[in-house]
Image (tube, rainbow, N blue to C red):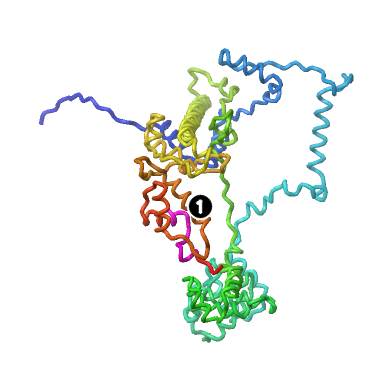
Amino acid sequence: MKQSLDLKLGQHLTITPQLQQAIRLLQLSSIELQQEIQEALESNPLLEENEREDEAADAKGETDTSAAAGLDGTDIHNEPETLPTADSGPDVDSSPNDDLETEWTDSFESMTAPSGSRSASDDDFPDIDARNSPPQTLHDHLLWQMQVTPYSDTDKQIALALLDAISEDGYLSCKLEEIQQTLGKHPPIELDEIEAVLHQIQNYDPIGVGARDLAECLQLQMKLLPPETPNLSSALSLATPQNLALLAGRDYAQLRRSLKLSAEDLQQVIELIQRLNPRPGNSVTSSQASYIVPDIIVKKVRGVWRAELNSDVSPKLRINRQYEKMIHRGDSSSDNRYLQDQLQQARWFIKSLHSRNETLLKVSRTIVDRQRAFFDHGAEAMKPLVLHDVADTVSMHESTISRVTTNKYMLTPRGIFELKYFFSSHVSTADGGTCSATAIRSIIKKLVECETTTRPISDSKISEILSEQGINVARRTVAKYRESMNIPPSNQRKSLV
């Protein structure tokens, strides 16, 4: 076997730590980015937030400063000259220290004021305990009520088994025979005992909990209504599995024959049923509110739509100059190496953050430029747009555009939209042009909103109306768009009056 040396030329891409960090920051949402920045500020002593305390002082000379900065591209920090005003009066003995002391005194008094004095501004103080406490579950709510109810040892064991079998919607998820098997045979427990304990649980809050089906859930709620409630007896007759199946199928003719009611009376009975809660457990289970912070703000300036970054999302960072001056060249001590590493990481982080903001702003401005008709006229004027179109405009890869537009939101005068909302496929029109799928969805939604409830419009009719407007859409495509907007079919949208 002969050994030899060969030379080969090739290209390969190496994902450096800097590139990995830039890609990771690029796909973070605004809230995740704020957490990432906060962690970086806490872990890296050479990284600090640029609060720019002199912004208030430079506000008076904003015009002159911005003009001077625009000439040579440098920041100019001039102390504005304080001029006397008409309201200031001839008093020249007042000093800034007196104003500062007064401000500190007012702030201290407001912070130390008793709770009763805050009655006018209680809404300004968030409930920290409620926000940070774990969400209450339906099982916890029912368990608390069971603990204050006098039960024997056997009944308490049955009640615990029943509570474990109640789903988050409030329904009993298994049969009583199955619960009897789980309780064991020592001592033997009869089904009548389990049924009696279940009836007690069904009196718990929320009303209707522990029901075995929808009919029983509705009946439990209607039994607590005042006896003089109009159409209460007819509503109780309607709340049976057979009649509810007819109601779900919109078979009003069969319901009228079964209940012997006129169309007007049946409509009132249905309205009474609709006021009840078919999922009583959802009224107890609390969910953590998820907030959306827009990354981009779109405004119309002098007749032109412009997209700008939300400055509150990504604060300006800088290198701490004091720690940077402590780094000595040629010093190989552990402290100096630590500062050098932290300095390099801080520079990488700032550069990656700047690259993220620059890419996000470039993509957002391209979207706004392509979808100006949407901002002027609404969703019906949305134009077809795919990732490839934006990638060609900004000279980036489609995967980068996908990362930028995921979990990023844009605040517009028409509401808050995810950047991916502005991307949609196209449908051919009769004149050879294209129409956005988002625009078609908007047209379908408006047609359904304007329809007559007694004679709802069908998917085939919607397809015909779109064809008359020059948009060639099949019935199956209309059904797909309708289902994506959670609009039920025409037979489920029909009402009596």
- In the image: residue 264, left or right of residue 241: right
Tag 1: amino acid: Lys
Residue 353's place in the image compared with 273, above or below, is above
Q: Position of residue 469 (x, y in %)?
A: 42, 47
Percent x, y of residue 246: 48, 75
490 part of magenta stretch: yes
- Quarter location, residue 413: top right
Q: Is residue 187 visible?
A: no
Q: Position of residue 179 (x, y in %)?
A: 50, 78
In the rendered view, would you say 429 is above or below 12?
Answer: below
Q: Residue lying furthest front in this view?
A: 468
Residue 356 is a magenta residue? no
On screen, residue 406 versus residue 286, left or right, reads left
Magenta span main SS: helix
Q: Residue 469 versus residue 227: which sits nearer the camera? A: 469
For disc 1, the marked residue is 446
Q: Is residue 436 visible?
A: yes
How packed mark 1 is, by other alpha carbons closer than 10 Å (few <14, some 14-19, many 20 or more), is few
Q: What are the residue bounds of the magenta stretch? A: 481-493
Residue placed most toward the observer, 409 or 485 = 485
Quadrant position of residue 460: bottom left
Residue 389 image offset from top left, x and y in percent: 38, 35
Q: Residue at x 60, y 75 (%)?
A: 265
Q: Residue at x 83, y 31 (%)?
A: 102
Q: Which quarter of the picture shows residue 262? A: bottom right
Mark 1 element type: helix
Observer-nearest residue: 147 or 4?
147
Residue located 62% across and 14% down the image: 68
